Amino acid sequence: MVAAGLLAAWGMLVVGTVDNLVKVFILHGQSQLHPLLALLSVLGGIQSLGPIGILVGPMVVVLLQTLLGILRTELTHFKKAEEDRTGGDTQSNETKTLSGLIRKVKGSVIREESVSTEELPKSETPVIGTE
């Protein structure tokens, strides 16, 4: 009976205090880390690094989450700049499919070759279609 009381006191005092401190100071600051992801990061950190993993695991996950947020922001700015540069139409319907893109590339290559063959002397004219 005494052992059960000591175990209950240990659970309330030590484990409860550590749980509240870890949650408040490490996991829930401004990180916006989901509680399940926080639990998995703590468990994974402990599994791989030992006791220091309690701190390092969530820090690595928050770092990855922050880097992914920065990447998403940069890609959004890049897409917006591309739309502004092209006048809002980033891809025509022709180039949305792979076959349309291939036709477009082949057409531009043929136009370039027809212009370049007229400008070259006869001895330097490229031979097309020989493999």
Image: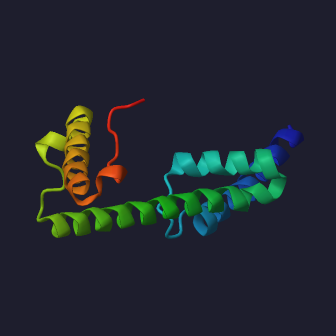
- Residue at position x 18%, y 63% from top? 83
- Residue at position x 51%, y 58% from top? 65
Q: Is residue 41 left or right of residue 67?
A: right
Camera-nearest residue between 84 and 51: 84
Q: Is residue 17 above or below residue 109?
A: below
Looking at the picture, how far across and down is residue 102, in whole percent? 26, 38
- Residue farthest right in this picture: 3
- Residue at position x 70%, y 46% from top? 43
Looking at the picture, how far across and down is residue 82, in whole percent? 24, 65
Camera-nearest residue between 85 and 7: 85
Camera-nearest residue between 114 and 125: 125
Q: Is residue 109 above or below residue 29?
A: above
- Residue at position x 78%, y 44% from top? 47
Q: Is residue 2 left or right of residue 12?
A: right
Looking at the picture, how far across and down is residue 33, in whole percent? 50, 57
**The C terminus is located in which quarter?**
top left
Q: Is residue 56 left or right of residue 117?
A: right
Applied colour scheme: rainbow
